Amino acid sequence: MIRKLWSELVKGLTLENPLMVLMIGLCSALAVSTRAENTIFMGLAATFVLVSSNFIISLIKKVTPNEIRIPIFIVVIASFVTIVDLVLRAYFPVVYSRLGVWIPLIVVNCIILGRAEAFASKRGVLESIADGLGMGLGYIWILFTMGFVRELLGTGKIVFFDRTILSFGPSFEPPVIFILFPGAFLTFGLLMAFVNFVNRRIKK
Amino acid sequence: MSAFRHYFLLFVGAFIVQNIVFIRFIGLCPFFGVSTQVETSIGMSLAVTFVMTLASAASWIVWNYALVPLGVGEFLYIPVFILVIASLVQFVEMFIRKVSPPLYKAMGIYLPLITTNCAVLATATEVSKPGFLKLNMPYGYSFIEGVVYSVSVAMGFGLAIVIMAAIRDRMKVSPVPEWLKGYPIVFIVAALASLAFMGFAGLFGM
């Protein structure tokens, strides 16, 4: 049982990573990864919604009529997104203003509806929670890697809560392109190429 | 004349200067998923234009005549707008199937996908809820402005997806390095396209 849950958790991190392999939930990943700090908040918000909606949807799967399941899933997801939206706005206004539209848009993040439809509506409660957690962590680690690379190259330093934790020093002239729009596509494409490269080596 | 100028600037701003795909990163999943052939991407962009315009108009009406008078907009807007979009997509699907079977055949498969296209929800919310996006105006849109704006955004989406599909068509015969094959090279092409679109920043003083 434990081993089964563990495998559901791990697959989100590697072989079924939502961003790298399933290619879903890209918009928010590219848009918020300008700073490493932002990605942590965005990742946690999405993971919270993912785990809670997977939990509720797997609980109500027996009483959900098949024809109207999508609207029901969306209402469940939208309620949790509203919770995150209001909590962030109340307690972390600075972060909220930086993440902006991406918090309400978690509702239409394909990862969440996709997992609800493909996994939570068919499987048990514990498995669904493990799946949600794994997918969420898989989302976070890619997001954080991107945020880290883009902030470090684009600004020359990493700032966490107003404290510089890593810096190239003043003589480094940062290529600003990495925190601009093309940098997001470029970093993601190269990261993906790297993951493909490693996967191919492992398979050989 | 100044009214024309106003709408023209609104159009250009949403169409290319703030292009929804390349500059604002909204609607990327269908952008990468569907842009494999020019033909399908044209079908997709027509379906998106259709739904986005209707959805923005419907959400504008719901926001201004139901949510604001009742005073529940701040915490109910997400579920209400997404339900408006989901039911609208269902309705449009049934309507088109009944009225024009060829059109249904052409864009039928794309319609259900549009419910989870974040571009539709983002534009509908942006048009209805004042101050939702700082990039644009802090005040709300009038109904006509909202419709013009959402048509322009949808056309920007169409432009991006058709450009991408055409490039990917050509790329099928070009020698791509082994480790970049598949999606990585598509992202790098998107980076170059986005770089090109950044050149529009500051057009007409915007």
Image (cartoon, coloured by chain):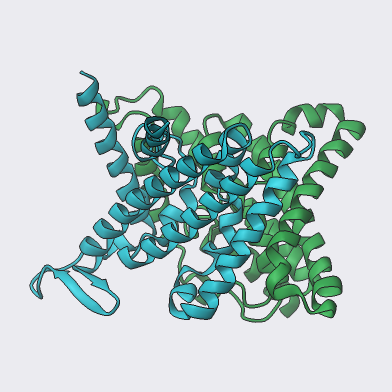
Of A156 and B198, nearer the camera is A156
| Quarter-of-image position of residue B182 | top left
How many labels sit on residues? 0
Residue furthest right in the image:
B99
x and y, in percent, of residue B101 in the image: 85, 27
Q: Residue at x 27, y 65 (%)?
A: A176
Of B151 and B90, nearer the camera is B90
Q: Residue at x 52, y 52 (%)?
A: B21
x and y, in percent, of residue A71 in the image: 74, 46
Tell me the cyan chain. Answer: A
Q: Would residue A140 be found to the left or right of residue B84 on screen?
A: left
Q: Is residue A153 visible?
A: yes
x and y, in percent, of residue A132 in the image: 49, 45
Q: Would residue A120 be found to the left or right of residue A2 on screen?
A: right
Residue furthest front in the image:
A1
Query: In this picture, is B67 found above or below A50?
Result: below
Q: Would residue A189 be found to the left or right of residue A66 on screen?
A: left
Of B201 and A12, nearer the camera is A12
Tell me the green chain. Answer: B
Query: In this picture, is A70 found above or below A95?
Result: above
x and y, in percent, of residue B124 in the image: 70, 61
Q: Residue at x 24, y 20 (%)?
A: A203
Q: Would residue A99 be found to the left or right of residue B86 on screen?
A: left
